[in-house]
Structure formats: C-alpha cells, structure tokens
Image (cartoon, grey):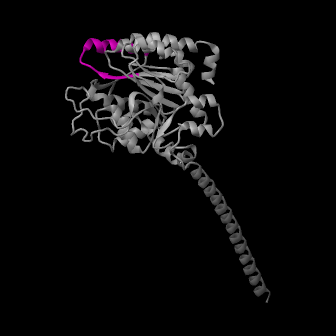
C-alpha cells in the first residue's frame, strides 16, 4: 500500500516538474516574441523615415536643426536618392560582414594583382582621417613637387591626419625611371606598379591604387582620388567631410564627385579618348564621376574590387570605376558639382579670390605654376589659429 502511494507521489512530482519547465519555456518564448515584435516596429519606423530617397543631404541634415551656415555651404545632391541613416542601419551588419572579409586578405589574393616596383612605407592607422591618392605620370615630377609644396605639404596634411600617395606605372625612359626611384627614396609617397603608364592603361592605374588601399588603408575614414593637375582646398574638404561624418552620413557605400550624366562617347579616331563601337556600343556613357577628384567611403575599394570580377574591363578608368562598377553595385552618386572649377588660368585667379564662401574647392590647373599662386591665396586665408581650429573641430 505504502509502495503504491510512493509511486503515485513520485509520478505527481515528476508531472509538476515537467509542467514547471514547460511554463518557464513558454514565458521565455513569449518574451522573445515580444522583443522581436518591438524590434520589427522600430525597423518599420526607420524604413518609414527613409522612404523619401530623392532628397539632398542639405535637407536631411537640416532636419536635425544644425548650423544653418554650414548647411547652406553643403550643396550635395544624390543621383537616384540618398541612402539615409535609417536605411543604412538596416543593412550595416550584412554590409560590414561582406565588405570587411577581403580587407584582411593578402594583396596577392585580391583581383588584378601585379608586382609593385616601388611600395611606399606608408601606414594607415585608425586615427587617420583620410588618404588622398593621385594618378600621376612618371615624367610629371614638377607637378608632384608643386603638390608637395602646396596643398599636399605634409605639415598641412598632418594637421588633418591625412596622408598622400602618388600612383603610377612604368615607362621605357630609363632616366625617368631612375629619377622616380630617387624621388621615392626622398619623399616615401610613391606607389609604382608594373604596367605601362599609358592612356589605354589608366584602368590598371586605378585598380592598382584601389587594391593597395584595400590592403593597407581599410581602417581610414575617407579616401580621395585626384589627378596631378588638380589643386584641392584641403581645408574645405576636411571641413565638409567631418561635418557629414558627425551626423553619421557617408560612412559606407558613398561616392562624392562631380557627376557626369549623358556624356557622349567620343568616336573621333584622332582623339586620344577615342572609343570604338566594339568597346562601348552605346552613344552616351552611363552616369559616372569626373576623374579630376572624387571621395569614397572606406568600404568602397573592396566593393569595387569584388564587383570588378563580374563587370567586363573597360579602359577609361573614370567610366569603369565610378560608372560601371559603382552602378553595378547599386550605389548612388552624390553630386558635388558646385565645388569644381575647370581650366583655371592666371587671369581667372582674381575672380576666384572673390569667392569668400569658398564654394569652389577642386581646381583644375592646366599650368603647374598657377598652383603656387592660388595656394598662397587660399593658405593665407586659413593661416591663422581661429580658422584652423574651426576645421580641426
């Protein structure tokens, strides 16, 4: 009799334990579902806030009721829509997972690998703000020197935690090649890769730069590409980018430039930019950036290298890199055309000096000597502690 009661007691106790465990699991599951539901509601709110994609960065930042004077200066328009902060938050984990995996690979494992004849002892660290890489021709040593002595001065760039790199290929002139080695040993700012430095190989120069930066500078805040006949108002560039960065814009999937839309393909066989119908059948190029200067978020080199494996190579680097590859990624160009001025000559310096607001920050200079004169004027305006402190904030 006692044995039967003992068995019944044990069975009741076992049922009670099982019921308790089930109840606990049910409560935990309910909490998780409520948590997920709350997350979905927040995500839905963020998607609603990001619905209107065809707006300017000015309008987005203005919603935060920030400094109206700076908002007025920033006339940035996104071609095809701005990827707003809310939309970026929804995708940030996947995008970082996809983009960071290659940034840690050895350079030989990235596409378009070629041997570097000269590798700079340049090291990017997380504390750096920007790296500027310049497409240069080996024989253009005077242009490189003009940049080093003006806006690319290491003392100036050092204030803004910015580094400078000249990228080039090789030429058949032995004297020029030897002088490049001497120049590199002195300034430590040249990347020379084993390809013929010709117009038809501009694509190789672009990909060599992206590959090196993807390996050595993936931990930097911004990347700027320009040419050796460009003067950059580095004060204003840093000022604008830090302003955007402050409000979480332009952190990834970002390209800022002077946008070309509907540009005709040159069919004149006498032009060095001649493109045959076999190379590019359309009469106009797809949307792309002026190669004079453009700015990228740090994830872009890896993304561009990845997608280049799927997009047939085209020799015009501006069209290929900033057009075909960027468009294939589905990334929208942010237009900053108001900041560019082309063909600056000595007789136009007076007009530029009247630009007190300094909306023009990318200057194309056909004559190298003008770079010194224009820089003296720009530097004089910034060569006092108050102006510099405003940029360094």
Q: Is residue 177 magenta?
A: yes
- Where residue 315 appears, x then y in whole percent? 28, 33
Q: Which residues are magenta?
A: 166-187
Query: Residue 142's quadrant in the figure?
Result: top left
Above or below, 18 against 91 in this view is: below
Residue 390 visible to an observer of this rendering:
yes
- Where residue 216 appears, x then y in whole percent? 45, 30
Q: Residue furthest right?
A: 2
- For the N terminus, which image quadrant? bottom right
Query: Residue 389's quadrant in the figure?
Result: top right
Residue 242 visible to an observer of this rendering:
no
- Where residue 330 appears, x then y in whole percent? 42, 45
* Predominant secondary structure, magenta span: helix
Residue at 31%, 13% (x, y): give it.
Answer: 178
Residue at 62%, 17% (x, y): give it.
Answer: 387
Q: Residue furthest bottom?
A: 1
Please give left or right for residue 3 compared with residue 227 in the image: right
Above or below, 241 against 87 in this view is: above
């Amino acid at each position: 009799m006692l044995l039967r009661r003992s068995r019944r007691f044990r069975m009741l106790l076992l049922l009670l334990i099982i019921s308790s465990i089930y109840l606990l699991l049910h409560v935990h599951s309910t909490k998780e579902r409520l948590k997920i539901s709350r997350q979905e509601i927040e995500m839905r709110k963020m998607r609603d806030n990001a619905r209107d994609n065809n707006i300017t960065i000015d309008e987005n930042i203005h919603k935060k009721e920030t400094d109206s004077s700076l908002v007025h200066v920033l006339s940035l328009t996104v071609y095809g829509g701005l990827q707003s902060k809310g939309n970026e938050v929804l995708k940030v984990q996947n995008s970082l997972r996809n983009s960071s995996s290659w940034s840690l690979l050895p350079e030989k494992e990235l596409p378009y690998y070629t041997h570097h004849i000269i590798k700079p002892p340049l090291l990017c660290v997380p504390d750096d703000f920007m790296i500027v890489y310049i497409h240069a021709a080996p024989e253009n040593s005077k242009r490189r020197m003009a940049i080093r002595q003006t806006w690319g001065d290491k003392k100036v760039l050092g204030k803004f935690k910015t580094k400078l790199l000249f990228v080039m290929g090789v030429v058949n002139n032995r004297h020029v090649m030897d002088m490049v080695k001497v120049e590199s040993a002195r300034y430590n700012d040249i990347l020379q890769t084993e390809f013929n430095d010709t117009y038809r190989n501009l694509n190789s120069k672009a990909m060599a730069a992206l590959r090196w930066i993807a390996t050595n500078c993936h931990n930097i805040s911004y990347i700027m590409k320009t040419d050796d006949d460009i003067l950059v108002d580095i004060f204003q560039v840093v000022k604008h980018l830090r302003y955007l960065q402050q409000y979480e814009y332009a952190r990834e999937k970002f390209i800022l430039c002077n946008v070309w839309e509907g540009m005709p393909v040159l069919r004149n066989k006498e032009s060095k930019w001649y493109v045959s119908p076999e190379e590019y059948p359309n009469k106009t190029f797809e949307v792309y950036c002026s190669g004079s200067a453009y700015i990228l978020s740090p994830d872009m080199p890896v993304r561009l290298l990845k997608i280049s494996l799927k997009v047939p190579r085209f020799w015009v680097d501006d069209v290929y890199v900033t057009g075909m590859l960027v468009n294939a990624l589905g990334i929208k160009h942010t237009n900053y055309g108001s900041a560019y001025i082309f063909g600056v000559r000595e007789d136009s310096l007076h007009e530029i000096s009247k630009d007190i607001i300094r909306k023009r920050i990318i200057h194309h200079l056909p004559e190298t000597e003008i770079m010194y004169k224009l820089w003296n004027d720009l530097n004089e305006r910034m060569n006092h502690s108050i102006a510099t402190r405003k940029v360094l904030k």
